[in-house]
Image (cartoon, rainbow, N blue to C red):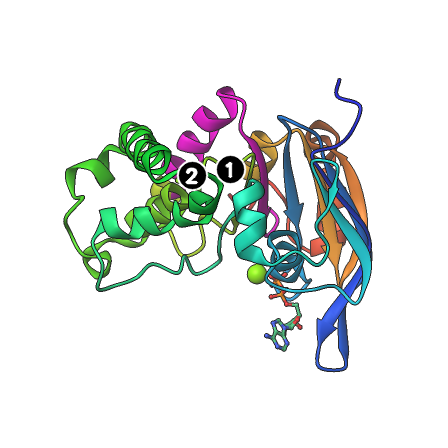
Amino acid sequence: MSARPLLEVKDLSVGYGSTKVLKGVSLTVEPGEAVAVLGANGAGKSTLMKVISGLLTPWEGTVTFDGRDVTRMPAEERAGLGVALAPEGRGIFATLSIEENLLIGATSVQGRMSARDFRRHKKERLDRVYATFDVLARRRTDKGCNLSGGQQQMLAIGRALMAAPTLLVLDEPCLGLAPKMGNEVYSVLHDLRQAGQSVIVVEESSRRALDFVDRACCLKLGEKVLDGSAAMMKADDLLLEAYFGVSGAEKS
Ligand SMILES: Nc1ncnc2c1ncn2[C@@H]1O[C@H](COP(=O)(O)OP(=O)(O)O)[C@@H](O)[C@H]1O
Ligand SMILES: [Mg+2]
């Protein structure tokens, strides 16, 4: 057991304009742990991921990563420290090739190493990502716009992995995908977990996410209403139903 969490979010409040969206949310991820953030549409899940990855500065509260206060650290710098977001909606560059999209994911670590080491890093990471996602390897020169939804999602995850992140942040990785494709995404995520990757994953209520993570918390209208082991939440579908009006077993 490590003495300190990898990520610690404490008493976080933030919003847009004068509207407060997150109200005093706290959350931790231990090294090597996978944590799900569940909640209905509009609960504030993506807002929380934006704060964790540095795209949004909180009004109140702190974000500590690997023992460092990163609350006001910009996203680019935070990515260099080891936090990589695969955003909701994927953010693929349609006119760039798969490989060009992937290489963008490596730029956040460029400032931390010599030009020579960076060239080596890019090659190593590309090899690793292509070994993980053979569809990306096969189609590396294809343009982003020619990929299916599932392939775009693989590319978004692959791009986040190009920075060799300590913490991989996934915002609704299966949104809009057919169930079979969603299963494929989770199958890759399982492999990454086996290799020790720490992950925070956002989903609406999802049995598949609970099968994947160690722990989950639920957001409702910007407040954390539940936090516990995945086993506990799976054992009590009624609990999830009470919070979301949807059974974890019904949705996958
Ligand atoms: N850029 C924005 N400007 C104004 N309001 C926003 C913005 N992004 C999200 N919101 C609002 O914040 C609330 C939480 O949104 P979000 O974090 O995207 O929720 P979730 O990811 O759980 O669906 C919603 O009411 C949404 O309308
Ligand atoms: Mg969202």
Question: Is residue 191 on the magenta stretch?
Answer: yes
- Does any atom of ligand 2 lie closer than 8 Å to the CB of label 2? no
Quadrant assignment for the N terminus: top right
Given residues 161 and 216, the one toward you in this image is 161
Classify residue 233 as left or right of residue 247: right
Examine the rendered structure and indicate whether residue 20 appears above or below residue 6: below
Mark 2 residue crowding within 10 angstroms, few (<14) / some (14–19) / many (20+) = many
Q: Give the SS element for disc 2.
A: helix
From where the camera sits, is residue 68 visible? Answer: yes
Name the residue rendered at 70%, 59% in the picture. Answer: 72
Q: Give the SS element for disc 1.
A: loop
Instruction: Identify the residue under disc 1.
Output: 165
Examine the rendered structure and indicate whether residue 104 appears above or below residue 208: below
Work out which residue is located at the far bottom of the displayed protein and give it: 18
**Residue 159 x %, y %:** 38, 46
Instruction: Identify the residue under disc 2.
Output: 161
Label 2 near label 1: C-beta < 8 Å? yes
Q: Quadrant of ligand 1?
A: bottom right
Q: Amino acid at mark 2?
A: Leu
- Hey, which quadrant is residue 175 in on the image? bottom left
Q: Which residues are magenta?
A: 182-206
Q: Amino acid at mark 1?
A: Pro
Question: Is residue 10 on the magenta stretch?
Answer: no
**Residue 8 x %, y %:** 76, 42
**Residue 66 x %, y %:** 69, 36
**Residue 155 x %, y %:** 33, 47
Name the residue rendered at 14%, 48% in the picture. Answer: 141
